[in-house]
Image (spheres, rainbow, N blue to C red):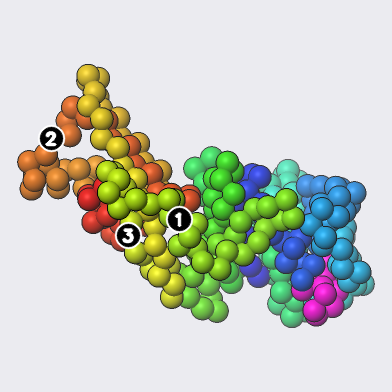
Amino acid sequence: LTLISGAPGIGKSTLLLQTANNIAKKYGKVLYISGEESEEQIKMRGDRLLALSPELYIISETDVLNVGMHIENLKPVFVIADSIQTLYKSSISSAPGSVSQVRECSNELMRIAKSGNIPFFIVAHVTKQGELAGPRVLEHMVDTVLSFEGERTEEFRILRTIKNRFGTTSEIGVFEMRNSGLEEVSNPSEVFLEETDAAREGSVVIGIMEGTRPILVEIQALVAETKAAFPRRTAVGVDTSRLNLILAVLEKKLKISFYNCDVYVNVVGGLNIEGTLGDLGLALA
């Protein structure tokens, strides 16, 4: 049971439809259950993505018991449910998307998956803060949790593993959104480096490890004097508290004052640098 989450419009359904098509072409029947779109809408996307394997079956259904019947009749090798927040069990009075409905529907899908030995992909919504919506028990129940990240204005997307019972959680997949759908980026370092000029101020290239892959990333920083009482601290791709910590170290050790300066930091390509990996590059930039 694999859970995939991401912001609205990031490309979750595109990724899963392409995945479903590839699996259907190679291994047999795949069932795509959509509670958010009609069959016609998915067919239109399938036409655009050229994801039209004859072994790919689509239903628009929200009752989890009917879903179970379709799976029993079709006997697919792979199932995608988009999304868990739209499914409901008629025996529970609360609305779809509520804690009790999400928990019960997840339990039902887990029972079908484990008893029938069928791999499942479940799509889940995220909150405004970018965290997984619904009860925390959802993350405990599933075997793998994937997060699909990126800025909607940027064409690059990152698939990150949050939890994985079958392997490492530190690997990432990098994709580019094109008219024909998502395409794998085999050399992510190219993506995360703009036309870098070593002499350009405020731009530093650092090497970070994402799983087993070393990736080169460009950090851009701008420090501008301000007359405002409270200077601004804006960071994209770096945690703001991390930025404040580095500024405090620079003030203390190098006697550089930032109390009268706005500080802006950006990591090129929409990558988020976590932990201490980018500290030196951030300080230098």
Give the amino acid type for the residue marked by disc 2 in the picture.
Ser
Tell me the mark number nearer the camera, choosing from 2 and 3.
3
Residue in the picture at 65% in, 70% down:
1
Label 2 residue SS: loop
Q: Of residues 91 and 147, which is closer to you in this image? A: 147
Residue in the picture at 7% in, 41% down:
255
Give left or right: position of 119 versus 50: left
Would you name the residue on which mark 2 appears?
257
In the picture, the disc for residue 45 is none
Give the quarter of the image for residue 274: bottom left
Residue in the picture at 30% in, 45% down:
200
Q: Label 1: few (<14), some or many (≥20) within 10 Å?
A: some
Q: Label 2: few (<14), some or many (≥20) within 10 Å?
A: few
Tell me: residue 253, above or below residue 173: above
What segment carries the magenta color? 23-31
Would you name the residue on which mark 1 appears?
192
Q: Position of residue 178 (x, y in %)?
A: 68, 52
Give left or right: position of 186 versus 181: left
Label tally: 3
